[in-house]
Amino acid sequence: VISASVLALRRRKFESLADRRGELMSISFFPVIPFIGGATQTLFYGLSILWPCVTAAILIIYVQKGNQAISQDFLTGMNNRGTLDRFLQSLADSGTERALTILMADINNFKEINDRFGHDAGDRALVRAADIFRSAFSDTPAFLSRYGGDEFVVVLPERAMSGGDAAARIEKGFEKADGQDIGFSLSVSIGAASTAGRSGITPADLLREADIDMYDAKSAFHGAVSAKREA
């Protein structure tokens, strides 16, 4: 229990969302309430409050896990779109110019995967893709989200890495995975947008730009595939 509390406290330092920080804080302080109850019970003979304190601590964790279920995508465990929207809004509400890079990625040929292998295979592809994103940015303060369908969003401070470097990490991760555990290969089309050298750009603006850039990359991918088939 103590080890889990320490781990939650350490993870809280790298968490951007206030509600997630609150959740991790609740986990990290889980042993405190039972400890206080046990100490009080020891000092005052006949007073039985240890188990009510344990129950209260468990109830707090239960409520926080309910909040987590609301904020996370049920399939991949990533932040969902609502959580992304709140995160971007919190950046906009801060009132300070922030150096940001936003990437949007879309799984190539996802409809064909569903049509050929079935929707269960499509779900496995989404879970595998989420794992690749987590691995690619495990050493950064990146905020990762499943935007919807087969689209994913990465938000990271510009000082962490450039959009090009971030995209290269993603592509390398998918190339390295090479269909492991799911039976077919995956690739993504990636769009990126950054505040570099610009002012007055909101996080919502960057998301729209990344979306447009991603669809340009998607068109280029399908064009390359068509040309290859015709050759």
Image (spheres, rainbow, N blue to C red):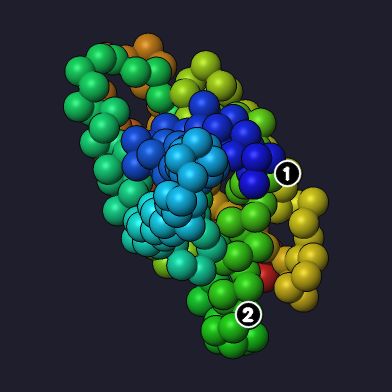
Residue at 30 percent of width and 53 percent of height? 82
> Hey, what amino acid is under mark 1?
Lys
* Disc assigned to residue 18: none
Q: Quadrant of the C terminus?
A: bottom right
The image quarter in which residue 151 lies: bottom left
User: Which residue is drawn at the image coordinates 59% and 39% (left, top)?
Assistant: 5
Relative to 128, is 157 above or below? above
Q: CA distance from mark 1 to mark 2?
A: 22 Å
Query: Residue 71's x, y, as percent?
Result: 37, 55
Q: Position of residue 189 (x, y in %)?
A: 54, 52
Residue farthest toward the front in the current orientation of the protein: 45
What's the residue at 37%, 12% (across, down)?
197
In the rendered structure, which disc, 1 or 2, sits on the residue that comes first in sequence?
A: 2
Kindly identify which residue carries mark 1.
172
Side of 85 where 140 appears, left or right: right
Are the two marked residues, 1 and 2, in contact with CB atoms closer than 8 angstroms? no
Secondary structure at badge 1 equals helix
Q: Is residue 100 visible?
A: yes
Q: Secondary structure at mark 2?
A: helix
In terms of depth relative to the viewer, which is nearer, 231 or 3? 3
Left-right relation of 117 to 215: right
**Hey, what amino acid is under mark 2?**
Ala
Position of 161 relative to 170 (above/below): above
Mark whose residue sits in front, 1 or 2: 2
Position above or below: 119 against 169? below
Describe residue 128's horizontal placement relative to residue 27 as left or right. Answer: right
Nearer-the-camera pick, 128 or 70: 70
Q: Is residue 170 above or below residue 100?
A: below
- Front residue of this view, candidates 16 and 104: 16
Q: Residue at x 59, y 83 (%)?
A: 120
Residue that numbered label 2 is attached to:
121
